[in-house]
Amino acid sequence: MKEPTRDAVRSRLVEVAAHLLATEGPDAVTTRSVALAAGVQAPTIYRLFGDKNGLLDAVAEHGFATYTAQKPPVDADTDPVEGLRSGWHLHVGFGLANPALFRLMHTAKRTPEGQATVDSGTEVLRQRVRRVARAGRLRVPERRAVDLIHAAGVGVVFALIDQPDDERDGTLADLAWDSVCAAVLTDEQASGIGGPAAAAVTLRAALPDVTTLTTSEIALLADWLDRIAEAT
């Protein structure tokens, strides 16, 4: 029988550790239990991951990769705001379905590879926010919107998974989303773009498509628009 490759063994150990984490909790994820369930010797874990913390870092990275793979294409929704909302619900749903993994994902020390995986997921959020800005619906700079949505999303999931199942506030995630919307979005019913700041955000989002200005002129205009947007 052909010996499994190093990558295959590594993947198997990560999957086993993730399963133990999900079904039995963090205390069940020991080098001995993972090695036994995976059918390998415990020293294999140390050779592949360094120690238990290295294994947990790999599980967190795997969690981010799994979560990012579940995200639909950025342009799946015609309405960019609805796309942003769908992403919020996916995030909250993933956290509630995988509480121990979610906690690990947001507390484990990240390796460079793990950070790259996290960044790929954040990039999807940036693209969704950029679509909202291009539609004239964003009232704050894109970076601020991304940071606020991320912070609120992580925070609300932590709050929910810390609540006993029979006492969980089913309205909390929706209330948090409404608060985020009030902070970063313009009124859908408003005529035109809501004020100079929102107009600056909208034009800033469209700058990559501008071809009539030089690189230096675009950089200068971007700086001016950022200053207008940040003035709110």
Image (cartoon, rainbow, N blue to C red):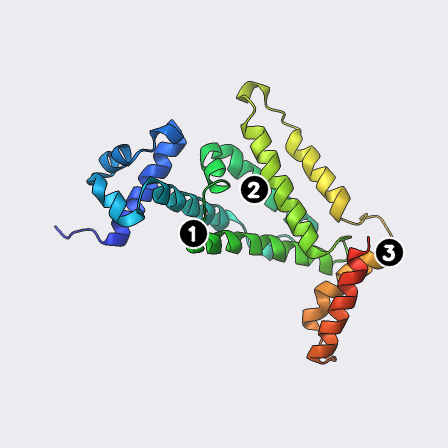
Could you tell me residue 19's position as x and y percent? 36, 35
Residue 153 lies left or right of residue 47; in this view the side is: right
The answer to whether residue 23 is seen in the rendering is no
> Of the residues under marks 3 and 1, which one precedes in the sequence?
1
- Identify whether 155 is placed above or below 76: above
> Of the residues under marks 2 and 1, which one precedes in the sequence?
2
> Of the residues under marks 2 and 3, which one precedes in the sequence?
2
CA separation in Å, label 3 and label 1: 42 Å
Q: Secondary structure at mark 2?
A: helix
Q: Secondary structure at mark 3?
A: helix
- Identify whether 76 is placed above or below 37: below
Could you tell me residue 56's position as x and y percent? 38, 41
Could you tell me residue 23's position as x and y percent? 38, 29
Which residue is tagged 2? 90
**Which amino acid type corresponds to the residue marked 2 in the rendered image?**
Leu
- Identify whether 66 is placed above or below 99: below
Residue 147 lies left or right of residue 140; in this view the side is: left
Could you tell me residue 83's position as x and y percent? 64, 49
- Identify whether 59 is placed above or below 220: above
Q: Quadrant of residue 63?
A: top left
Report the number of numbered marks: 3
Bin the neighbour count of mark 3 within 10 Å (Cα to Cα): few under 14, some 14-19, many 20 and up.
few
Query: Is there CB contact under 8 Å for labels 2 and 1?
Result: no
Which residue is tagged 3? 195
**Which amino acid type corresponds to the residue marked 3 in the rendered image?**
Gly
Residue 186 lies left or right of residue 59; in this view the side is: right
Which residue is tagged 1? 111
Q: Residue at x 28, y 53 (%)?
A: 7
Q: Residue at x 46, y 38 (%)?
A: 104
Residue 148 lies left or right of residue 185; in this view the side is: left
**Which amino acid type corresponds to the residue marked 1 in the rendered image?**
Thr
Task: Please identify the residue farthest to the top as the structure is shown.
Answer: 166
